[in-house]
Image (cartoon, rainbow, N blue to C red):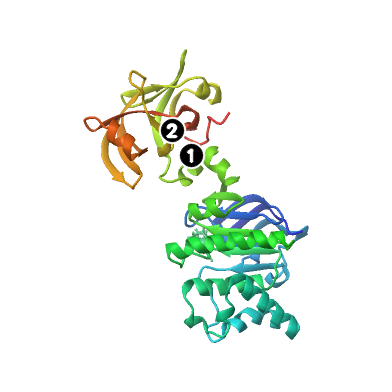
Amino acid sequence: MAQLSIRNLEKVYGGALKALHGINLDVKDGEFMVLVGPSGCAKSTTLRMIAGLETVSGGHISIGDKVVNNLPPGERGIAMVFQNYALYPHMKVRKNLSFGLKLAGEKKDEIARRVAEVADVLEIGPLLDRLPKQLSGGQAQRVALGRALIKKPEVFLFDEPLSNLDAKLRASMRVRITDLHRRLKEQGQSSTVVYVTHDQVEAMTMGDRICVMKDGRIMQVADPETLYARPENAFVAGFIGMPEMNLVNATVSRGEGGPVVTFGDQSVRFGADLAGRLAAGTDGDVTFGVRPQHFRLAAPGEDALIAKVIKADFLGHEVDVHVTIGGERFTVVLPVEEYRKASVDGALRIRPDEERVFIFDRVSGQNISLA
Ligand SMILES: Nc1ncnc2c1ncn2[C@@H]1O[C@H](COP(=O)(O)OP(=O)(O)OP(=O)(O)O)[C@@H](O)[C@H]1O
Ligand SMILES: [Mg+2]
């Protein structure tokens, strides 16, 4: 079993800069966990501490049921794949793959068997006698993956392994890696993964669960659907989803007929759903959140917001419409046909979908509408 457990993990660089503020995280045996967050939030720091490449300033890391804080990297049962795959340039692919096993004193025929196995899984058999400089980016990355895989580690650590590849190759490597993970699992091999990226699409498409980080702290850990549908705070809400969720200043007042949300000189009344989700006593200044996809056109005569169109970006079947409502800027995504029909004198009559709007505390950013 190779579950990974992180307790109150801290990192202080150079005695002054606190990069990681006591995080707690459990990764289950065989789970694919993605660490995601903006540059500098300490994703690599966390990963490098798990790998043993960085000292621990406080707290514990366990792999299986063993605390590994003071174990050297080679004894942790991990393998790591980096962004700049760092293949040995003077060694052919075959040797790049087998080098680690040879150092570990593995027998010759066992090494040959494992090289063949890994080459087969990653479809790099025809490349075994090439030098790294004779490989494309995607091929080199597969060799780097093979070098990790051949060790049969209990835990795989990936630090932005695809960020040097172009968009198309990145998409196909994503599928390859998740597919490989699934197959290893089916074969009963332990394959716990911690995968670092700053790309939310990569996180959403690859992770069984995703850990969203900011400034050395964990903002939320959940499966992709939950992160999208139930963000615990405005940061996660804004980080996950494209285009970004609209997060705007608003005021809420709880009237008889349901909560009324006001942006500048415009208001919209919601009903029982939002009333039921809002924490007791919520009134006054808040941050209102609604995804661009979660607006609909208002029916004639229905209570609506008047959205003044600033710019419309046509993306084929959809339009990203940039609007202002009561002076606040929003993005609204609509099907092209609907937009064409509904836009009158540069304005749209729209309503947010009540069941998918959120209210966040203006100061703390906590989602106070999850019920
Ligand atoms: N060796 C180091 N010495 C001092 N400060 C460091 C060191 N490595 C990282 N830091 C600092 O620690 C913080 C976290 O860095 P880290 O590299 O873990 O971020 P990251 O989330 O991986 O960012 P990126 O997405 O840019 O790779 C940053 O403020 C960084 O400047
Ligand atoms: Mg990094």
Q: Residue furthest front?
A: 337
Q: Amino acid at mark 1?
A: Ala
84 relative to 172, above or below: below
Return the residue nearer the eye: 252 or 237: 237
Return the residue nearer the eye: 276 or 138: 138
The quarter in which the N terminus is drawn is bottom right
Callout 1 environment at 10 Å: few (<14), some (14 to 19), or many (20+)? many
| Point 59% across, 53% down: residue | 207
Q: Mark 2 falls on what kind of element?
A: strand
Q: Amino acid at mark 2?
A: Thr
Q: Mark 1 falls on what kind of element?
A: helix
**Displayed quadrant of residue 112:** bottom right
133 relative to 39, above or below: below
| Residues at marks 1 and 2 touching, judged by CB atoms closer than 8 Å | yes
- Residue occupied by mark 2: 287
Q: Is residue 159 visible?
A: yes
Q: CA distance from mark 1 to mark 2?
A: 8 Å
Residue 234 marker = 1
Residue 255 in percent (x, y) is at 45, 15
The quarter in which the C terminus is drawn is top right
Residue 71 in percent (x, y) is at 72, 68
| Point 46% across, 14% down: residue | 257
| Point 70% across, 53% down: residue | 28
Q: Residue furthest top?
A: 256
Residue 74 in percent (x, y) is at 70, 72
Return the residue nearer the eye: 46 or 162: 162
